[in-house]
Image: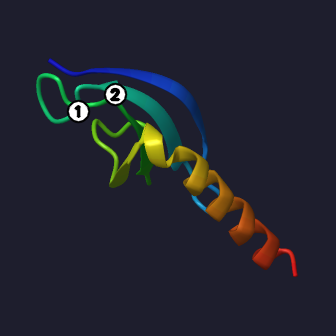
Amino acid sequence: MSSKKVIKEFKLAGTKDGVISVAHIDEPYGAESKPVVSIGISLKANSNEPDWKAHIPYENLDELIEALQEAKKEQNK
């Protein structure tokens, strides 16, 4: 059975009460599946499920962080 631990939630810019959540999920795809980082976006803070979510394997986390940093540099040009 998978378990979820919310690491951080913060306001989704440009929305009235939207939220971005980052969580750790053990066994997201059943017994013995590897844990992932889950990034969820909810347009309403009190949603049971996010409107969008992505599961990122921990093995890809460094590459994702690098890509996000590159995107931030592009935005700041």
Q: Is any atom of residue 44 visible in this view?
A: no
Find residue 59 and report its horizontal and vertical position in percent: 45, 42
Point 72% across, 68% down: residue: 70
Give above or below for 52 relative to 39: below
Q: Quadrant of residue 10?
A: top right
Residue bearing mark 1: 28
Q: Nearer the viewer, residue 12 or 71?
A: 71
**Residue reaching furthest right?**
77
Whole-number angstrom distance, CA of label 2 to CA of label 1: 6 Å
Quadrant into which the N terminus falls: top left
Q: How many marks?
A: 2
Badge 1 marks a residue whose secondary structure is: loop
Element class at badge 2: strand
User: Image quarter for residue 46?
Assistant: top left
Please state if 51 lies on the left or on the right of 9 as rendered: left
> Which quadrant of the figure has residue 36?
top left
The residue carrying pointer 2 sits among few (fewer than 14), some (14 to 19) or many (20 or more) residues within 10 Å by Cα, namely: some
Residue 65 vs residue 54: left or right? right
- Amino acid type of the residue tagged 2 in the rendering: Ile
Image spot of residue 33 (x, y percent): 20, 30
What residue is at 73 percent from the left and 60 percent from the top? 69
**In the rendered structure, are the residues bearing label 2 and label 1 in contact, judged by CB atoms less than 8 Å apart?**
yes
* Residue 42 visible: yes
The type of colouring in the image is rainbow
Q: Locate residue 59 relative to residue 66 in the image: left or right.
A: left
Instruction: Tell me the kind of residue under disc 1.
Output: Pro
1, 53: nearer the viewer: 1
Q: Report x, y in % for residue 34.
A: 28, 31
- Residue beneath the point at 87% across and 82% down: 77
Q: Which residue is mark 2?
A: 25
Numbered badge on residue 3:
none
